[in-house]
Amino acid sequence: MPRETPTNKTKGVVAVRTAALNDPDEKPCDGHSVAVIVIDPSKGVLIGDVPDGAGASSVGGHVFDVHWSYKAAACGEVLEETGLTVTALMPVFEKPVRRLNPCKRGDGPYGLGHYWQVYIAEVDGRLNVDPKSLLRPRWVSRVELQRLAQRTLGRAQHTVSAEAWAEEPGITPTWVQWFAEAGLIEMAEADLRDIEQFMRIDGASRR
């Protein structure tokens, strides 16, 4: 998947920050997102189902809604969505990478997609998940994560129907790539491309 690093972004970010702060109900896409893979050495990986039915993910969100850096957004989103406090945060990429994933808010200041940073986070505290963010929160093993990712591949390759997916969703198409980049699942490049293509045309994948 092609990657780019952000350039000349200050003007667009400031405009989005200002809009979000002046009108909390108006949240345009800022073009920057974090994905936070929450792990526990004894429990596994924390995932939950996205309320819109797109599948399961860990924690994520736009960066500049209320935060001022990728790291701050990662810690803030984990606390907001799960009630857990980040104790360790490891970035997957040296710099944020561009990915042309559709956003449910519409295109941002750079057009389609976001500049992403993916983190692996260790946490502390009591799990208290926001149901507006994730449903059926659970800790899963890498084996189960792999199984769910294979189900997403089946959906992308049309061997899993929309009805079967609704009964038992896999990982959201957006998140399969991130789990693969973090080394938590294995997926052939050709299969990742199929999922990426499906993500861009499937309306339920706008996350």
Image: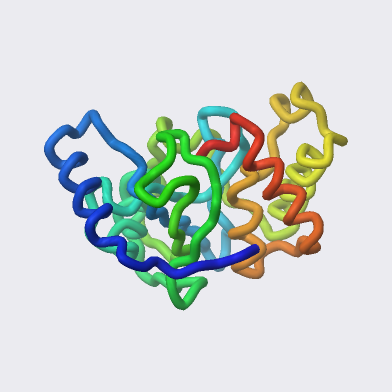
Q: Residue at x 43, y 35 (%)?
A: 106
Can you give x and y, in whole percent of width and height, for residue 198 in the image? Answer: 70, 41
Is residue 114 found left or right of 68 in the rendered image? right
Can you give x and y, in whole percent of width and height, for residue 120 in the image? Answer: 49, 66
Q: Looking at this view, name the residue that lies furthest to the right.
A: 159
Can you give x and y, in whole percent of width and height, for residue 62 in the image? Answer: 36, 48
Pick the residue in front: 201 or 85.
201
Q: Relative to residue 186, is residue 161 depicted above or below?
A: above
Q: Residue at x 32, y 38 (%)?
A: 28
Q: Relative to residue 74, is residue 204 depicted above or below?
A: above
Pick the residue in front: 71 or 13.
13
Q: Relative to residue 35, is residue 171 depicted above or below?
A: above
Can you give x and y, in whole percent of width and height, for residue 107 in the image? Answer: 43, 40
Q: Looking at this view, name the residue that lies furthest to the left.
A: 22
Q: Relative to residue 5, is residue 57 depicted above or below?
A: above
Pick the residue in front: 45 or 77.
77
Is residue 44 found left or right of 18 in the rendered image? right
Is residue 136 found left or right of 123 in the rendered image? right
